[in-house]
Amino acid sequence: MIVIQCPLLISVRSNIFRRWVSKLVRKFFPLLILLALLGAVVWAVSMGTLPRADFVFNNGAEIKTMDPAQATGSPEGRVINALFEGLLRSLPAGEPDELGRIPMKPVARGMADRFTVHADGTVYRFHIREDARWTNGDPVTATDFAWSWMRFLHPETASEYNYQLFYVRGAEKFNAVQLAVGDKVEVELADRETPELFPRGTIRRGILRELILPLPTEGTAETDVADDVAAISGKAIFIVEFQTESGNTSAKETIAYAVSADGSLAGIDELKQTYTGDFPLADIQPCKHVLYDFNEVGIQVLSPQDLEVTLNSATAFFPELVAFYPLHPVHRGCVEQYGARRFTKAEHIVTNGPFRLKERRIRDRIRLIKNEQYWNAAEVELDSIDVMSIQSETTSLNMYLTGQLDWDTTPPNAMLPILKKRDDFVSTPFLASYFYRINTAKPPLNHPLVRRALNLAIDKRSIVDNVVKGGQTPADSFVPPGMNGYQGYQGSGQNVKRARELLAEAGYPNGKGLPQIEILYNTADSHRDIAEVIQQDWKKNLGINVVLRNLEWGSYLDSLQTGDYMVARSGWIGDYPDPNTFLDMFVTDGPNNQTSWGNVKYDNNIKMAKREADPAARMQLFVEAETILMEEQAIMPIYFYVSKNMVQPNIQGFYANLQDIHPLHLIKIRREGSATHDAISEDTN
């Protein structure tokens, strides 16, 4: 599941006004092109000069991270997939469908050269190729994957995608600290050498004999799923028994621990007073973590080349998850030497993908060069790639038109009616939804009637026809069409009359008394413009005052994660063609939920769907879950995406597909002919 950054431009509702603007644009278009080209030149000169890379594309936003465990966005994913490689690779495979989309399938063309699946679908065994190497020459081993996945799941890493491995036996118990008496546990002692998570302190493994928790408070929520164990957060005392070996003798040792970030035991005395057992609590020791023993998680190293993964139940799309970039490995020595924030710097980073990091210029470019250590380096044609960070869609397009870019990922929506007629415009529907998150913890958005009113007041058809203009379709559900066997929630579209009724039922007739609402979006003219359309709809239809706030990409992601917003623009690309990739993100307290919304019935449906073997029954669980999500309106779907790519005619290996993913190591350049275009003229209309 990938957060999308995509372009949208201002809506022009009046036909007369549209014709007037069209005439004005045609009249002054040569001047606008000239000014934009001049701006592009000034931009390039201001950032200094580098020899042109073999392949240059605009990635839009400045990426937040190159750490696979911390990334969440499409811009990050493009870079990480070039630098790192997982066990499997999602590659084009098969014949195009009726829309020209090539299927993307996970295949053993990554670090693994083969894998097997047990007959019951629960045990995968991956064999890592003998010639897999890190850029420093170290071999890539099964231990690298086990350690990287442990880091990915560790609660202190706080990866937003950690739930992607919850299909693995014991993975959720490890991540969520779901412990019960009798479990095998690992205790990290309070003796780290640095403030960093890795290298960890001393790890002791034992058995949890007693667990002292605060007494439950009235109204504590309970789950309907009988085999769930509640996650432990806050203060707790863990009484752990260890087996110690000395020569031919063994002995048992029992110690009481309390997790402490700073080594203090503040607040533990209250817990001690509730204890009625026999173990003496006079000498409680502080520790960093008490977790479910990772050795019991279904990720086992059988040999340097063999990794075995055991799932809770058969999961047909598990190979797609294995190929997804959050599960790419990182080099343990590099992470432990430089720490989580510095190991991705160009002078430190060690990678295992088809390219390596040469240089990074903030707000300019990332220079990638071919990794000669890569197992399949002979098939990688590009020696260098420039990943540009250009937020201006107009500048990006004109750099493409003058041959400075080979791939433009963000052509301006205002130009789409012209660009769609060109052979170098590659566009197709794909599995992605553009939507607004609602922070349900912030009044008045904690009222579901208010949220439903806001959704019904938006003219999504107008946004699609007059703003995005690329062939998108209005969305009244979250899961996009194209999932075999899934017929999801069907909304009613815009209904201003009903929206006003709902707002009045909530206590705000004609918007009176309703506090001002703020819309957050990441910096781009396109996102601003669609926010302005929705701002106008809510003011005109509901009498609500709305203000807009924009943040650059990294700060925007931080605000979503911390809940520092009221309503926020969002986007999501499916990781595989299944409703689960969209719906499992909104389980209560899920890392990618970010709305403060939760529903026990919804959570249980998602959990039961993971175990349901009957395809029809499984899809029905998803339908019920999506209905709950939409009727409680934690999000407001706006439209379903189409891809919009400008690709130079001499570029080969670029294929339209359902996820709009384009592996950079497949790109080849046909050398004959020119890669430049004349500026768009009126004749192109």
Image: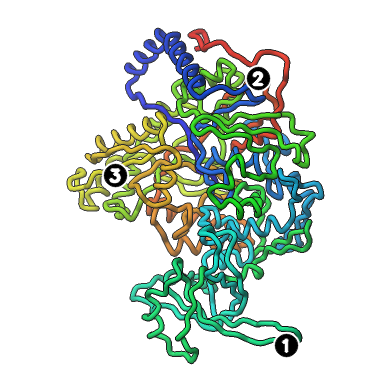
| CA–CA distance in space, label 3 to label 1 | 75 Å
Query: What residue occupies the far bottom of the structure in this picture?
Result: 278
Where in the figure is residue 53, as x and y percent of width and height? 64, 25
| CA–CA distance in space, label 1 to label 2 | 74 Å
User: Circle 1 sits on which residue?
Assistant: 249
**Mark 2 Cα shell of 10 Å, populated few (<14), some (14-19), many (≥20):** some
Where in the figure is residue 636, as x and y percent of width and height? 39, 45
1 or 2: tag closer to the N-terminus: 1
Q: Secondary structure at mark 1?
A: strand
Q: Amino acid at mark 2?
A: Pro
Numbered circle sitting on residue 499: 3
Towards the viewer: 242 or 547: 242
Towards the viewer: 558 or 49: 49
Can residue 625 be seen at all in this image of the molecule? Answer: no
User: Circle 2 sits on which residue?
Assistant: 649
Q: Secondary structure at mark 2?
A: loop
Residue 253 position by quadrant: bottom right
Q: Amino acid at mark 1?
A: Thr
Query: What residue occupies the far front of the structure in this picture?
Result: 193
Which color mode does the image show? rainbow
Where in the figure is residue 589, as x and y percent of width and height? 44, 59
Residue in the picture at 44% in, 60% down: 588
